Every structure is written in structure tokens, then in C-alpha cells.
Amino acid sequence: MDNVQTCAVCGGALDGINVGLCNGCGLPFHFNTEAEARRPDCGQAWLHPQYLTVEFGCFICLGMAPGREPPVGLGH
């Protein structure tokens, strides 16, 4: 049995290296760590201004995935 993880946003296979875990829903998504990478990017990261921690958000939870609604409580 194959245990390949898939991206919560686009459904594509994840390589285990360029992966982010969304702080909103907890699901994995494609996340590029290089600016010039030619891989899908299905989320964003930012620095929390108060705690100076890196936070990750998938495009679904950020309301940036066309035709997809964020989970209740995040974007509503």
C-alpha cells in the first residue's frame, strides 16, 4: 500500500521536502522554499508580528483557492 501524501489544495502528490502544514486546518500543502522554484505553490508563510514565529496558511484557509471555502470559523 502506498502512503503518498497529497496536497490539501490541489490534490497533487507531495514530495516530503517542499511541504507546509497549515496553521488553520493542519493539512499539508505544496510550499516552495526557493523563490525561483518551478513547483506548485499552494500556500504562504509569514512572520507573526507579536510572537516572531513563522506561520503557514494554505490557500483554502486564506480564502485564495477559487471555488473553495475556508473551514467554518477561519474565513467566516
Image: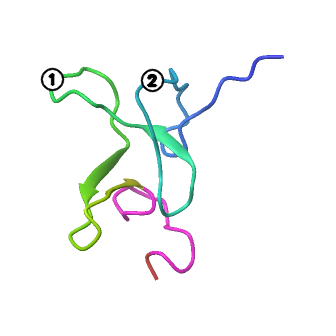
Quarter holding residue 20: top left
Helix, strand or loop: magenta stretch: loop
- In the figure, 23 relative to 50: above or below? above
Residue 64 shows which numbered tag? none
Determine the secondary structure under disc 2.
Answer: loop
Q: Residue at x 24, y 74 (%)?
A: 50
User: In the rendered view, does 47 fall on the left or right side of 3?
Assistant: left
Q: Magenta stretch: residue 69 in it?
A: yes
- Segment colored magenta: 60-74
Q: Where residue 7 appears, x then y in whole percent?
A: 53, 37
Q: Tell me how many marks there are.
A: 2
Q: Label 1: which residue?
A: 36
Residue 17 shows which numbered tag? 2
User: In the rendered view, does 16 fall on the left or right side of 33?
Assistant: right
| Quadrant showing the N terminus | top right
- In the figure, 71 relative to 60: above or below? below
Q: Where residue 25 appears, x then y in whole percent?
A: 55, 60
Q: Residue at x 36, y 36 (%)?
A: 31
Nearest the viewer among 69 and 21 is 21
Nearest the viewer among 49 and 62 is 49
Q: Where residue 76 appears, x then y in whole percent?
A: 46, 83
Q: Residue at x 44, y 63 (%)?
A: 61
Determine the secondary structure under disc 1.
Answer: loop
Q: Where residue 37 appears, x then y in whole percent?
A: 23, 22
Graded by Cα atoms within 10 Å as few (under 14), some (14 to 19) or many (20 or more), the crowding at tag 2 reads few
First of labels 1, 2 by sequence position: 2
Quarter holding residue 42: top left
Amino acid at the residue labelled 2: Ile
